Image (spheres, rainbow, N blue to C red):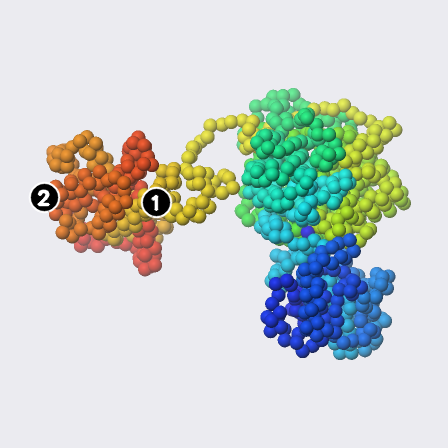
Amino acid sequence: MSAKAIREATGKRILNQHLTGTAAEPCRFAAVSESTDWGELVAENPWLRSEKLVVKPDQLIKRRGKLGLIAVNADLSAVRSWVGERMGRDQTVGRATGKLRNFIIEPFVTHKQDEEAYVCIYSHRYADTILFHHEGGVDIGDVDAKATKVDVAVGASITADEIEEKLLKKLPQAKKKMVATFIEKLYQVYVDLYFTYLEINPLVVTSKSIYILDLAAKIDATADFICRQKWGEIEYPPPFGRDAFPEEAYIADLDAKSGASLKLTILNKSGRIWTMVAGGGASVIYSDTICDLGGAPELANYGEYSGAPTEQQTYEYAKTILSLMTQEKHPKGKVLIIGGGIANFTNVAATFKGIVTALQEFQPKLVEHNISIFVRRAGPNYQEGLRIMREVGQNLGIPLHVFGPETHMTAIVGMALGKKPIPSVTAMEFSTANFLLPGGQNKESPLQSRKSSTSTLAPTTTSRETSGQASGQSGDAPQRKGVLFNKSTKAIVWGLQTRAVQSMLDFDFVCCRTEPSVVAMVYPFTGDHKQKFYWGHKEILIPVYKKMEDAMTKHQNADVLVNFASLRSAYESTVDTMNYPQIRTIAIIAEGIPENLTRKLILMAQEKGVTIIGPATVGGVKPGCFKIGNTGGMMDNILHSKLYRPGSVAYVSRSGGMSNELNNIVSKATNGVLEGVAIGGDRYPGTNFMDHIMRYQADPEVKMIVLLGEVGGVEEYDVCNALSDGRITKPLVAWCIGTCAGMFTSEVQFGHAGSCANSDRETAVAKNKALAEAGAHVPSSFDSLGDLVAEVYESLVQEGVILPAPEVPPPTVPMDYSWARELGLIRKPASFMTSICDERGQELNYAGMPISDVLKQNLGIGGVISLLWFQRCLPPYVCKFFEMCLMVTADHGPAVSGAHNTIVCARAGKDLVSSLVSGLLTIGDRFGGALDGAARQFSEAYDSGLIPMEFVNAMRKKGQLIMGIGHRVKSINNPDMRVKIIKEFVLEHFPSTPLLRYALEVEKITTSKKPNLILNVDGIIAVSFVDLLRHSGSFTREEAQEYIEMGSINSLFVLGRSIGFIGHYMDQKRLKQGLYRHPWDDISYVLPEQYN
């Protein structure tokens, strides 16, 4: 949602900070809530004790004075008493009943009735309107009829002189200049801080000062990234009559952190009908259907999830819904409707996996609360998603009914409410794998291909050429007036949206275009390069440019830009695009562009003759010619809805998600779609319904028109006028979604930013009635929309207006390998196998343990080693042993070979990794690598039954050193403290240490011959490690031996010493040491004698 109401206290705080240079007195106020400490409040606002006060609720309640919800000219004790009597009590305002929880206290401003005035500023498509009336207050009456108005065009400004001349004619002359300056500055703040509505009534104007008494305001919440610093922290209160729930705040926070759309409004926490619907438009239609079938009193929530949320995000969303559902029991049990239209790009299986995880988690409570679940969904990978749902349904122990696109979108509502029978078996109409079949690979690669195709099939004619439908649109025929796309349309895509581009190319191919519609991509975050895509089986390269100018210059035949820029950069990139006259159509996909910026784009586009589709849209489709981005969904849906060839029906919708459902409805009821456009869900779409309907009216290939409007705005009345005055003569089937809005006791903002009725005229019910009276074909509900479309179509066929043609199968498009694998249609041997780590799920796993548990259980580095090296959680004493080994082996000074090499590399200017590797490469039998050798020698001697003396003698006879014995500096008289610490720990904590004790006996023999032949660090770690593997109870004998043989024991030294090597690298950099050169006097030069 963009325009959001704010509290009066918030609005006044913002004006205090930014409204300067006027005669307005700063607003003094104190906000009171249930948690307010009155002592602190008075200390912060001492004027509360000394002045007469005004107090009123601050909860978006209109006409508080007429409702008696205001106390004036009262002292602090009276105010406290007045608030205390009402705090937390139920209050009825109109049809809404809610609890009063927030109040605002202000100084009482003594004034006369004739000093009250009224001022209001509100925004609409092309301008901001300023209303002023020299009289104000609770009895102002019909302000629209009384007030003087002036429109300020978007992007323009207004001066105090103009305001004085146009608005203040009835104001006393002495006050005009002061008020004009105030309104001028107020309008500047309104624009600069992205207000969408600002009303002050009354505005008290004395001879010297201006006082803002009552204020109501809305701001454009999508401008948060622009205005956050100016606004400060803002809390958006719910409409009166609906409490703010922590679950709503949680979902709002998830939504703010996600590129997807997640919305939740709790209507009746005790209700038995709960929804979890994908798509903004679909969510409204499901609510409409529930209310149409009498379920309004029991409807518990409104919400949506859309925009390809991740598995984790849908899990969190579903978990929140289920936790709410299972807080209270209902005598009739509860129903959960998991619905949605046909998705364009959301992976249905991925989102359903998140929902299934939540369902399994809540299984006992679902049974306890007698919950039934009804599912209907379609779109990419929906078959796998429905399969997962059916499978989990068998184990939940509750009724769970699953349907796909073969079932009308809202049919499950009637089933859930007991109004329709539940079919036992449903027929599957089509499958995602349909476009995997071979054939149609007869086309030459339009661009130079890196790989050639071996296809030799005969040429395939297009359905257009053989059916006679929409004749005159094929090939490179001149584009007719009002037609946005044809078969030669070329597009540039802003953003590295490879999946969307491939979808466009596959659509081109199945439509039998001779060359791709996408000629280039623009992405300013990389250098110029080429991106690989598929054209049928063949690979082609599409250039990617860093600068828009380069793309336009090199591809002057492109006349469409598909803009995937984010909400923060979509405005700038669109303005940049409109500098190039070759572009006639721009589709803006991003949702959440601030309204002021969108309105500027609309004016700029009109000046330049550019058609804008969006923002907040999936785009549009011209069957047989061109599609925008992800419109139409996966190839199976394109084939199923016959979008590869033109039909006779053109539609326009606000909702992008519902455009796919319309494709499905129209393809079933008629000969198919000729063109479809989703104008976008924002309050100010770049083009409106009439822009496209009048194009359809002028296009002889369009035989009938379908309009899917919605609650909010008044654009549908322009269609009514055009029907009434004869500008629209073609049959028009129309339906406005959001008929449920009037059944809610409090205001509900639906999924789209523009879908909120601000007056009775903007309700869906009023619009549907007006459309029917103007001559449109209006169904009784969305459920019967398809039947009415079929009825109108059949009448046109009977009249001979439409001549149905035989179907010609389209060429098939090969499925991408990654998607085929996702669907489980193919298998391929993996290039790698791993059994220690998995990063694919909701969180990282170490040997099956989620990383969150690793941290919660405080496993430490030793625990992580046990998981990643040994695939199991080892006992705490083992983890402690690992950590001790790392500590004692971390470093042994700069003189040893590894540290020396690291230092030389660092001083040669090499990077960290190169220097570290240089040191690690010295580890071997002579330096540090004796752990494995020691483990092997001692364990073999022990296992073969040699007593320590026999082992020492045997090694001497072989002429081999005993690994792990001997030290250059330390001796039996000067012991190595590292060895002592580890030995004591192992002997105390290990359950059994036979090999360590064996090694200590060997040490007694070797030190008797030479005092420095002690058991060194390598030796103590090696033999202790073998004891650990063999006697900790965590490994079998075979596993222990395998770890010894694979060299795992040496890993502790490698890991530990890496810490020291990194330390030496950083030390040399910190000391800024120069290039190392070994001194001559430390080198013995021994040259061959014959040259001396």
Q: Vertically, is 928 above or below 205?
A: above
**What type is the residue that disc 1 sits on?**
Pro
First reached walking from the N terminus: tag 2 or tag 1? 1
Q: Distance between the residues labelled 2 and 1?
A: 39 Å
Front residue of this view, candidates 341 and 44: 44
| Residue 736 in sight in this render | yes
The residue lying furthest to the front in this view is 331
Q: Is residue 854 left or right of residue 500?
A: left
Front residue of this view, candidates 41 and 197: 41
Query: At 68% across and 26% down in the image, what residue appears?
Result: 424
- At numbered mark 1, what does the secondary structure look like: helix, strand or loop? helix
In terms of image quadrants, where is residue 92?
bottom right
Q: Vertically, is 51 above or below 934?
A: below
Residue indicated by mark 2: 1009
| Residue 678 in sight in this render | no
Residue indicated by mark 1: 876
Query: At 68% across and 69% down in the image, what residue appears?
Result: 80
Question: Quick one: label 2, few (<14), some, or many (20+) residues within 10 Å?
Answer: few
Residue 338 rendering spot, x and y as whole percentages: 65, 38
- At numbered mark 2, what does the secondary structure look like: helix, strand or loop? helix
Q: In this view, does 619 lie to the left or right of 861?
A: right
Q: Which of marks 2 and 1 is in front?
A: 1
**What type is the residue that disc 2 sits on?**
Lys
